[in-house]
Image (cartoon, coloured by chain):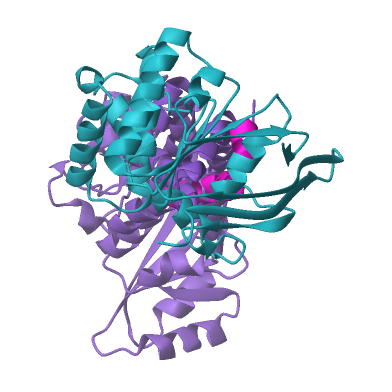
Chain colours: A purple, B cyan
């Protein structure tokens, strides 16, 4: 009764404070959903290759900077336990170069035409897989943005490539990309016959750890990673988490200060009323609980609103951002968001509540 | 009961910061069910005495004994205020956002009276003070006299043994003041509570069992 009426007394202030929390929680949900979505996309992408092991240049900070010589490729291909080796290259082409206003950039995956690695695009493909050096296949999002269909031609890095298929995938950045012959990227990136990385398909019963040791002894320049451990290996992906949590922390501090300000003003305005409550027998603990409850009600409403806004915000973000981003929500993330909101309400109201509970009834009643 | 309802012994109250002695040694006994009126000019110490009797404040020295228990050694003054004392203030001090009935419920919330019982008792008390037609009116929409009657009902909420009224008619016209005093007297008679009223008004003192006069922190 008292809690809601006190909050409704200054509706605008309560609303602003609630919005402060809602925006803080929304930022946490949105950035986390996009950050986790990106990491999970990478995991799904790696799993979808069907390969057990990915080999990259050890000194490359990220796979896009990795270079592996043909000699190293051949040495690993010849190792016992390796059933098949699929090399790959990778680049990103600006939308300006493509002269296509709808897309900011196009992710280009270089593969060997007819290789096992591109077999994964076969299910649901419209058209067929690339089999020749002048062919390419497009992800469905990229095909839509580029307004291309099988049979059309796209000039990419001065190479006219015939679109022979449009594939579908649940990995957003792959859907917004295309697969071209690796040789084209090697030529344009002046890689010679080096590749960026390669995937290994192992013979049944092969001990992958033993193989990793052999690879790293044979080619000290290389690092072998289990495809399922990809995002864990590239710890720079942790920067995404750091970024997300720093933004979240700032949002949380702003939200918490909002509650603190609201409750401090509220307590100051209601000093005389608090005196009355104390005079009619309310204990310090009851006053403390009253003010804390007001903070918690603000934070519960703000938290709930924040979850909705965050979800909406994340979907809006990936809708307007360059294609390729994905979102991932989990019960844990939503629970974390809501608990952070509750903590904001609790800690934001704690000092004002403590201050209110310490008021002497007689002094509070005399307050003008 | 041999013990008086309220006993004060050599009560002294000094405000150190302002170097003011509000009470300079006051000893009073008020018997159960009696109506005591305390008169005196502004600054005589009568409100300070009332606040000490009601455990709203603590004395610099001396002792208040309420229903046989010393407030000096009482660990829970909140409980004393909630259960044994009902306050009526000059400016009524209602919570402005609450209705009449909700304002009367406020002291009962302090002692954990269940919601349904709280509501029923508040309605009965408002009916007793003639406000059964204003149960759901927000405090700010009530007249001065009505607010003070809500304040009387609130003071009676936890069936206190002592009612303390500080200038209860100070903020209303004389006709309304008479109605308020009649209302307080009626409530006292029905509840059998001890009543202490602080006032400037000699008319109010006329109906009391005993009247004391104060000046400069002392009883005359």
Q: Examine the image and state in which quarter residue A134 appears.
A: top left
Looking at the rendering, the stretch of residues picked out in magenta corresponds to A341-366
Judge whether residue A104 can be spotted in this image: no
Q: Is residue A343 magenta?
A: yes
- Residue at (41, 85) in percent of width and height: A79
Q: Where does residue A325 sit, x and y in percent of width and height? A: 38, 41
> Which image quadrant is residue B182 in?
top left
Residue at 31% across / 53% down in the picture?
B112
Closest to the observer, B83 or A85:
B83
Q: In terms of secondary structure, what is the magenta stretch mainly? A: helix
User: Considering only vertical position in the picture, is B15 above or below A103?
Assistant: below
Quadrant containing the N terminus of chain A in the rendered view: top left
Q: Which of B202 and A106 is in front in this view?
A: B202
Residue A145 is one of the magenta-drawn residues: no
Say left or right for A310 vs A97: left
Q: Residue placed at 43% from the left, 29% from the top?
A: B95
């Amino acid at each position: 009764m008292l809690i809601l009426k006190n909050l409704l007394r200054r509706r605008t202030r309560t609303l602003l404070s609630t919005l402060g929390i809602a925006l803080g929680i929304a930022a946490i949900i949105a950035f986390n959903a996009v950050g986790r979505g990106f990491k999970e996309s990478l995991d799904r992408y790696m799993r979808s290759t069907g390969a057990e092991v990915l080999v990259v240049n050890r000194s490359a900070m990220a796979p896009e900077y990795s270079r592996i010589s043909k000699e190293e490729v051949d040495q690993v291909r010849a190792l016992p336990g390796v059933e098949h080796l699929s090399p790959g290259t990778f680049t990103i082409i600006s939308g300006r170069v493509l002269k296509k206003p709808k897309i900011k950039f196009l992710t280009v995956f270089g593969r060997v035409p007819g290789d096992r690695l591109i077999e994964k695009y076969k299910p649901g493909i419209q058209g067929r897989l690339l089999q020749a050096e002048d062919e390419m296949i497009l992800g469905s999002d990229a095909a839509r943005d580029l307004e291309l269909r099988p049979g059309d031609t796209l000039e990419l890095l001065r190479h006219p490539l015939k679109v022979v298929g449009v594939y579908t995938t649940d990995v957003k950045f792959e859907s917004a990309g295309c697969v071209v012959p690796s040789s084209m990227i090697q030529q344009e990136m002046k890689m010679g016959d080096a590749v960026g990385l390669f995937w290994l398909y192992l013979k049944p019963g092969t001990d992958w750890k033993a193989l990793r040791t052999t690879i790293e002894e044979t080619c000290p320049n290389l690092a072998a990673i289990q495809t399922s451990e990809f995002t864990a290996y590239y710890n720079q992906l942790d920067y995404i988490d750091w970024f997300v949590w720093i933004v979240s922390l700032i949002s949380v501090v702003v939200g918490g200060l909002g509650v603190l300000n609201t409750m401090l003003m509220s307590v100051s305005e209601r000093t005389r009323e608090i005196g009355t409550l104390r005079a009619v027998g309310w204990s310090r603990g009851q006053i403390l609980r009253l003010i804390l409850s007001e903070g918690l009600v603000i934070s519960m409403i703000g938290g709930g609103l924040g979850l909705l806004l965050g979800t909406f915000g994340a979907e809006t973000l990936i809708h307007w951002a360059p294609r390729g981003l994905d979102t991932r929500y989990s019960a844990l993330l939503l629970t974390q968001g809501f608990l952070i909101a509750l903590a904001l309400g609790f800690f934001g109201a704690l000092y004002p509540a403590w201050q209110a509970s310490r008021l002497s009834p007689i002094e509070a009643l005399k307050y003008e | 009961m041999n013990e008086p309802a309220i006993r004060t012994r050599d009560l002294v109250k000094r405000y150190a910061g302002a170097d003011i002695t509000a009470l300079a040694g006051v000893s009073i006994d008020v018997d159960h069910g009696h109506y005591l009126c305390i008169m005196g000019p502004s600054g005589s110490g009568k409100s300070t005495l009332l606040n000490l009797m009601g455990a709203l404040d603590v004395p610099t020295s001396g002792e208040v004994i309420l229903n046989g228990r010393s407030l000096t050694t009482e660990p829970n003054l909140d409980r004393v205020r909630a259960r044994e004392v009902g306050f009526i203030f000059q400016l009524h001090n209602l919570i402005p956002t609450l209705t009449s009935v909700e304002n009367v419920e406020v002291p009962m919330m302090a002692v954990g009276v269940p919601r349904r019982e709280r509501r029923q008792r508040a309605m009965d008390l408002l009916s007793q003070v003639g406000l059964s037609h204003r149960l759901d009116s927000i405090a700010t929409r009530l007249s001065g006299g009505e607010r003070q009657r809500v304040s009387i009902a609130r003071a009676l909420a936890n069936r206190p043994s002592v009612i303390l009224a500080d200038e209860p008619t100070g903020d209303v016209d004389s006709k309304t003041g008479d109605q308020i005093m009649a209302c307080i007297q009626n409530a006292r008679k029905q509840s059998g509570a001890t009543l202490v009223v602080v006032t400037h008004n000699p008319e109010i003192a006329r109906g009391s069992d005993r009247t004391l006069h104060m000046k400069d922190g002392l009883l005359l």
